[in-house]
Image (cartoon, coloured by chain):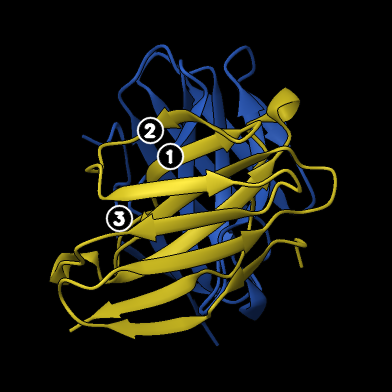
Chain colours: A yellow, B blue
Amino acid sequence: ETGVTQSPTHLIKTRGQQVTLRCSSQSGHNTVSWYQQALGQGPQFIFQYYREEENGRGNFPPRFSGLQFPNYSSELNVNALELDDSALYLCASSRLESNEKLFFGSGTQLSVL
Amino acid sequence: GESVGLHLPTLSVQEGDNSIINCAYSNSASDYFIWYKQESGKGPQFIIDIRSNMDKRQGQRVTVLLNKTVKHLSLQIAATQPGDSAVYFCAENIPDDKIIFGKGTRLHILP
Protein backbone atom coordinates (compact mmCIF):
# COMPACT_ATOMS: atom_id res chain seq x y z
CA GLU A 1 0.00 0.00 0.00
CA THR A 2 1.21 3.51 -0.84
CA GLY A 3 -0.41 5.54 1.93
CA VAL A 4 -2.37 7.59 -0.60
CA THR A 5 -6.10 7.36 0.04
CA GLN A 6 -8.92 8.52 -2.20
CA SER A 7 -12.61 8.96 -1.57
CA PRO A 8 -15.15 7.97 -2.57
CA THR A 9 -14.17 4.73 -4.32
CA HIS A 10 -17.16 4.83 -6.64
CA LEU A 11 -19.52 7.60 -7.65
CA ILE A 12 -22.47 7.94 -10.04
CA LYS A 13 -23.52 11.34 -11.34
CA THR A 14 -25.73 12.64 -14.10
CA ARG A 15 -24.72 14.88 -16.95
CA GLY A 16 -24.48 18.55 -15.95
CA GLN A 17 -23.83 17.87 -12.28
CA GLN A 18 -20.71 18.80 -10.35
CA VAL A 19 -18.42 16.41 -8.46
CA THR A 20 -15.67 16.68 -5.86
CA LEU A 21 -13.11 13.93 -5.42
CA ARG A 22 -10.73 13.82 -2.46
CA CYS A 23 -7.20 12.61 -1.87
CA SER A 24 -4.95 12.32 1.17
CA SER A 25 -1.27 12.32 0.32
CA GLN A 26 1.36 10.01 1.70
CA SER A 27 3.06 11.39 4.80
CA GLY A 28 6.04 13.57 3.91
CA HIS A 29 4.85 14.31 0.36
CA ASN A 30 4.31 17.92 -0.71
CA THR A 31 3.09 17.49 -4.29
CA VAL A 32 -0.10 15.97 -5.63
CA SER A 33 -0.95 15.07 -9.22
CA TRP A 34 -4.31 14.06 -10.65
CA TYR A 35 -4.80 11.73 -13.58
CA GLN A 36 -7.84 10.59 -15.55
CA GLN A 37 -7.80 6.99 -16.76
CA ALA A 38 -10.44 5.94 -19.29
CA LEU A 39 -11.18 2.25 -19.67
CA GLY A 40 -8.37 0.48 -21.50
CA GLN A 41 -6.19 3.59 -21.61
CA GLY A 42 -3.19 4.92 -19.75
CA PRO A 43 -3.58 7.65 -17.13
CA GLN A 44 -3.85 11.16 -18.63
CA PHE A 45 -2.25 14.01 -16.67
CA ILE A 46 -4.83 16.58 -15.49
CA PHE A 47 -2.79 18.86 -13.23
CA GLN A 48 -0.34 19.01 -10.36
CA TYR A 49 -0.37 21.04 -7.15
CA TYR A 50 2.56 22.17 -5.05
CA ARG A 51 2.35 24.55 -2.09
CA GLU A 52 -1.37 24.95 -2.69
CA GLU A 53 -0.90 26.28 -6.21
CA GLU A 54 -1.27 24.68 -9.61
CA ASN A 55 2.14 23.61 -10.86
CA GLY A 56 1.39 22.38 -14.35
CA ARG A 57 -1.69 21.34 -16.28
CA GLY A 58 -2.50 18.86 -19.00
CA ASN A 59 -4.97 19.22 -21.86
CA PHE A 60 -8.14 19.49 -19.77
CA PRO A 61 -10.76 22.28 -19.87
CA PRO A 62 -11.20 24.83 -17.06
CA ARG A 63 -14.20 22.97 -15.67
CA PHE A 64 -11.59 20.66 -14.17
CA SER A 65 -10.18 22.45 -11.14
CA GLY A 66 -8.34 21.53 -8.00
CA LEU A 67 -7.25 22.52 -4.55
CA GLN A 68 -4.38 21.54 -2.30
CA PHE A 69 -4.67 22.18 1.42
CA PRO A 70 -1.95 23.03 3.99
CA ASN A 71 -1.90 19.42 5.12
CA TYR A 72 -1.20 18.45 1.47
CA SER A 73 -4.56 16.77 0.97
CA SER A 74 -6.24 17.64 -2.29
CA GLU A 75 -9.54 17.90 -4.14
CA LEU A 76 -10.42 17.52 -7.79
CA ASN A 77 -13.59 19.35 -8.86
CA VAL A 78 -15.34 18.79 -12.15
CA ASN A 79 -18.22 21.06 -13.17
CA ALA A 80 -20.87 20.50 -15.84
CA LEU A 81 -20.17 16.79 -16.07
CA GLU A 82 -20.20 15.18 -19.50
CA LEU A 83 -20.63 11.52 -20.40
CA ASP A 84 -17.00 11.35 -21.50
CA ASP A 85 -15.90 12.30 -17.99
CA SER A 86 -16.70 8.73 -16.94
CA ALA A 87 -13.32 7.31 -15.91
CA LEU A 88 -11.08 6.28 -13.05
CA TYR A 89 -9.58 9.36 -11.40
CA LEU A 90 -6.20 8.76 -9.83
CA CYS A 91 -4.38 10.86 -7.31
CA ALA A 92 -0.62 10.53 -6.90
CA SER A 93 1.59 12.15 -4.31
CA SER A 94 5.30 12.80 -4.40
CA ARG A 95 8.01 15.05 -3.12
CA LEU A 96 8.86 17.84 -5.54
CA GLU A 97 12.55 17.09 -4.95
CA SER A 98 12.00 13.61 -6.40
CA ASN A 99 8.97 14.40 -8.48
CA GLU A 100 9.27 11.42 -10.73
CA LYS A 101 8.42 8.87 -8.06
CA LEU A 102 4.66 9.02 -7.98
CA PHE A 103 2.74 7.04 -5.39
CA PHE A 104 -0.83 6.39 -6.50
CA GLY A 105 -4.05 5.84 -4.64
CA SER A 106 -6.56 3.25 -5.83
CA GLY A 107 -8.67 5.86 -7.55
CA THR A 108 -12.28 6.98 -7.70
CA GLN A 109 -14.42 5.36 -10.37
CA LEU A 110 -16.77 8.03 -11.71
CA SER A 111 -19.73 7.11 -13.87
CA VAL A 112 -21.67 9.89 -15.59
CA LEU A 113 -25.13 8.89 -16.83
CA GLY B 1 -1.12 14.17 -27.85
CA GLU B 2 0.62 11.29 -26.15
CA SER B 3 4.27 10.81 -26.89
CA VAL B 4 4.53 7.39 -25.26
CA GLY B 5 3.02 4.25 -26.72
CA LEU B 6 3.30 0.49 -26.74
CA HIS B 7 3.72 -2.05 -29.51
CA LEU B 8 1.35 -4.76 -28.21
CA PRO B 9 -1.86 -4.31 -26.23
CA THR B 10 -1.85 -7.90 -24.86
CA LEU B 11 0.97 -10.34 -24.14
CA SER B 12 0.44 -13.97 -23.13
CA VAL B 13 3.37 -15.75 -21.48
CA GLN B 14 3.79 -19.23 -20.07
CA GLU B 15 4.36 -19.30 -16.32
CA GLY B 16 8.08 -19.58 -15.66
CA ASP B 17 9.10 -18.02 -18.96
CA ASN B 18 10.56 -14.55 -19.34
CA SER B 19 8.30 -11.67 -20.39
CA ILE B 20 9.37 -8.74 -22.52
CA ILE B 21 7.13 -5.70 -22.74
CA ASN B 22 8.06 -2.99 -25.22
CA CYS B 23 7.44 0.72 -25.40
CA ALA B 24 8.20 3.47 -27.89
CA TYR B 25 8.54 7.12 -26.97
CA SER B 26 8.79 10.15 -29.20
CA ASN B 27 10.04 12.98 -26.99
CA SER B 28 13.83 12.96 -27.40
CA ALA B 29 14.15 15.48 -24.55
CA SER B 30 12.67 13.09 -21.98
CA ASP B 31 15.31 12.33 -19.38
CA TYR B 32 13.68 9.76 -17.15
CA PHE B 33 11.52 6.72 -17.75
CA ILE B 34 9.43 4.58 -15.45
CA TRP B 35 7.56 1.30 -15.63
CA TYR B 36 4.36 0.93 -13.63
CA LYS B 37 2.25 -2.14 -12.92
CA GLN B 38 -1.49 -1.79 -12.47
CA GLU B 39 -3.56 -4.61 -11.06
CA SER B 40 -7.32 -4.70 -11.31
CA GLY B 41 -8.96 -2.22 -8.94
CA LYS B 42 -5.69 -0.59 -7.93
CA GLY B 43 -3.65 2.43 -8.91
CA PRO B 44 -0.38 2.10 -10.83
CA GLN B 45 2.51 0.75 -8.77
CA PHE B 46 6.12 1.78 -9.41
CA ILE B 47 8.29 -1.10 -10.65
CA ILE B 48 11.57 0.29 -11.92
CA ASP B 49 12.98 3.44 -13.46
CA ILE B 50 15.91 4.48 -15.61
CA ARG B 51 17.56 7.78 -16.44
CA SER B 52 18.52 8.76 -19.96
CA ASN B 53 22.25 8.51 -19.19
CA MET B 54 21.86 4.75 -18.68
CA ASP B 55 20.93 1.95 -21.06
CA LYS B 56 20.18 -0.82 -18.59
CA ARG B 57 19.01 -1.14 -15.03
CA GLN B 58 18.21 -4.25 -13.05
CA GLY B 59 15.91 -4.85 -10.15
CA GLN B 60 14.55 -7.93 -8.49
CA ARG B 61 13.44 -10.15 -11.42
CA VAL B 62 12.99 -7.08 -13.61
CA THR B 63 15.31 -5.35 -16.05
CA VAL B 64 14.66 -2.14 -17.99
CA LEU B 65 16.52 -1.46 -21.23
CA LEU B 66 16.68 1.94 -22.88
CA ASN B 67 17.69 2.50 -26.49
CA LYS B 68 17.81 6.23 -27.08
CA THR B 69 18.84 5.83 -30.71
CA VAL B 70 15.47 4.37 -31.66
CA LYS B 71 13.55 5.80 -28.69
CA HIS B 72 12.66 2.37 -27.34
CA LEU B 73 12.15 1.11 -23.81
CA SER B 74 11.57 -2.45 -22.67
CA LEU B 75 10.72 -4.23 -19.45
CA GLN B 76 11.95 -7.76 -18.95
CA ILE B 77 10.41 -9.92 -16.24
CA ALA B 78 12.31 -13.09 -15.40
CA ALA B 79 10.53 -16.33 -14.47
CA THR B 80 7.06 -14.86 -14.87
CA GLN B 81 4.66 -15.73 -12.05
CA PRO B 82 0.86 -15.63 -11.81
CA GLY B 83 1.18 -12.54 -9.61
CA ASP B 84 2.74 -10.71 -12.53
CA SER B 85 -0.62 -10.62 -14.32
CA ALA B 86 -1.46 -6.95 -14.69
CA VAL B 87 -1.37 -4.04 -17.10
CA TYR B 88 2.07 -2.55 -17.51
CA PHE B 89 2.62 1.09 -18.44
CA CYS B 90 5.74 2.85 -19.48
CA ALA B 91 5.90 6.52 -18.61
CA GLU B 92 8.28 9.33 -19.37
CA ASN B 93 9.28 12.49 -17.57
CA ILE B 94 8.90 15.22 -20.16
CA PRO B 95 11.05 18.37 -19.86
CA ASP B 96 8.59 20.29 -17.65
CA ASP B 97 8.77 17.48 -15.11
CA LYS B 98 5.39 15.90 -15.69
CA ILE B 99 4.95 12.16 -15.97
CA ILE B 100 3.19 11.07 -19.17
CA PHE B 101 1.89 7.51 -19.55
CA GLY B 102 1.50 5.24 -22.53
CA LYS B 103 -1.61 3.15 -23.22
CA GLY B 104 -0.43 -0.04 -21.47
CA THR B 105 0.13 -3.72 -22.20
CA ARG B 106 -1.88 -6.42 -20.49
CA LEU B 107 0.30 -9.34 -19.39
CA HIS B 108 -1.56 -12.65 -19.24
CA ILE B 109 0.11 -15.63 -17.59
CA LEU B 110 -0.67 -19.06 -19.00
CA PRO B 111 -0.60 -22.01 -16.54
User: If the image is split into quadrants, where does the N terminus of chain B sit?
Assistant: top left
Q: Is residue A98 above or below residue A112?
A: above
User: Residue A58 is drawn in which quadrant?
Assistant: top left
* Mark 2, residue position: A57
**Residue pictured at 46% horizontal, 15% vertical:** B95
Discs 3 and 2 share one subunit: no
**Residue pictured at 61% horizontal, 36% vertical:** A52
In this picture, residue B98 sits left or right of residue B24: right
In this picture, residue B49 sits left or right of residue B9: right
Choose between B81 and A46: the one closer to the eye: A46
**Local SS, label 2:** strand
Neighbourhood count class around disc 3 (C-alpha, 10 Å): few under 14, some 14–19, many 20 upward: some
- Please state which amino acid type lies under the numbered disc 1: Phe
* Mark 1, residue position: A47
**Residue pictured at 43% horizontal, 39% vertical:** A47
Label 1 close to label 2 by CB (< 8 Å): yes
Does the rendering let one see residue B101? no
**Residue pictured at 52% horizontal, 23% vertical:** B97
- Write down the chain letter for disc 3: B
- Please state which amino acid type lies under the numbered disc 2: Arg
- Please state which amino acid type lies under the numbered disc 3: Leu
- Write down the chain letter for disc 2: A
Residue B26 image position (x, y, % from top left) = 30, 24
Residue A33 image position (x, y, % from top left) = 53, 44
* Mark 3, residue position: B8
User: Residue B61 is drawn in which quadrant?
Assistant: bottom right
